[in-house]
Amino acid sequence: MPIHTLVIHGGAGTILRSDMTAEKEAAYRLALNEALDAGFLLLDKGNSAVEAVKAAVVSLENNILFNAGKGSVFARDGSQEMDASIMDGQNLMAGAVAAVRNIKNPVELAYAVMTRSQHVMLNGNGAYEFAKLNNIETAPDEYFYSAFRHDQWKQMQGSDEAALDHNVKIKDKKFGTVGAAALDMHGNIAAATSTGGMTNKQFGRVGDSPIIGAGTYANNKTCAISCTGHGEPFIRAVTAYDVSCLMEYKGLSLEEAMKVVVHDKLMKIDGEGGMIGVDAKGHAAMIFNSDGMYRGMRRSGGMNEVAIYK
Ligand code: ASP
């Protein structure tokens, strides 16, 4: 029986020990452990990898510390637009939403797109209408607001730049895109990713997170991957799918393939960030080329690891 495994991230970027207080670090570690608890409980009970990655991502979306769901970053016009996706490695089914507003848990909407529509990706008003029709919970703007994120945006307002949330040059650097990848006890893998995107982005901008093959990919034959980082290079590198291709066509292991993509291919096009992944044999890895990545891994048998810095 494969070892069931859950691996998560809460964003990569300029995350330095020198910018962290003991309380903040403890809060992040707690949040990461809570997300591992949420997903792993389901894996332990025999639920699917898809259910587990969704539950882990919902937990992270509901935590204001991370740039997804509650606490998402602000776009150039002061709105908060979110992207999310989920993919089932057993059957290559996928669902995604792009630039949605007022959806409490964008990953739940992505899951509904996968399971209850004929489509893979919905955006904007159509996504909102689909959410309403499918009883997906919505929330007012105030729910998503965080003073910290608002300050980050204020510092960039008026510029043409968009930034990874952790890289906004202010003292208190925190928050991040979230994601999960899992292997269940039936041997199936899945991945999910959710984000508020980049601070001060053009509204309507869509990052890599909801794009199947870029920010998220899962295929039982190879791997399940969730990425975090500067979305534009990740899209151009077709990042998550490239890991799968290196495994399928070149016979690389999960970790070898992730390292080639993160440390070589992405670096060559200024693609700062990282990714987490699992394969169907129970291997898992967390690889990044930035200063840090909020991350955690748990497996049946008792292994549990949560880490932040390089
Ligand atoms: N990849 C996300 C985006 O570009 C941002 C992040 O990972 O923090 O939208």
Image (cartoon, rainbow, N blue to C red):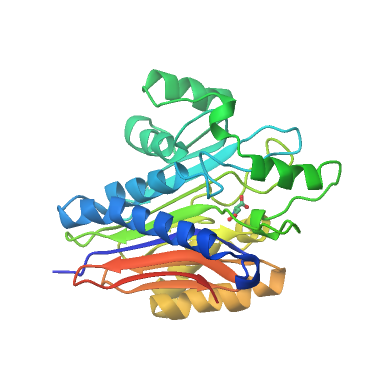
User: In this picture, is 136 found above or below 297?
Assistant: above
Q: Which quadrant would residue 267 be assigned to in this image?
A: bottom right
Q: Residue furthest right?
A: 158
Please report the residue visible at 49 percent of the width from the left and 62 percent of the height from the top. 240
Question: Taking 37 as reference, is 194 above or below it?
Answer: above
Q: Is residue 66 left or right of residue 148?
A: left
The quarter of the picture where the C terminus appears is bottom right
> What x and y, as percent, mark residue 146?
61, 39
Where is residue 166? Give x, y as percent. 65, 58
| Quarter placement of the N terminus | bottom left
Q: Which residue is found at the position 61% from the left and 36% from the top?
A: 81
Whole-percent x, y for residue 7 in the image:
37, 63
Task: Classify residue 5 by image quadrant.
Answer: bottom left
Q: Residue drawn at (49%, 43%), measured in percent from left and top? A: 84
Q: Can residue 218 be seen in this view?
A: no
Name the residue nearer the viewer: 283 or 149.
149
Q: In this view, does 247 lie above or below 232?
A: below
Asked if residue 116 can be seen in this view, the reply is yes
Q: Which residue is at the front of the view, 74 or 180?
A: 74
Q: Which residue is drawn at 60% across and 35% down?
A: 145
Left or right: 91 in relation to 180? left
Disc count in the image?
Answer: 0
- Where residue 48 sits: x, y (%)? 23, 51
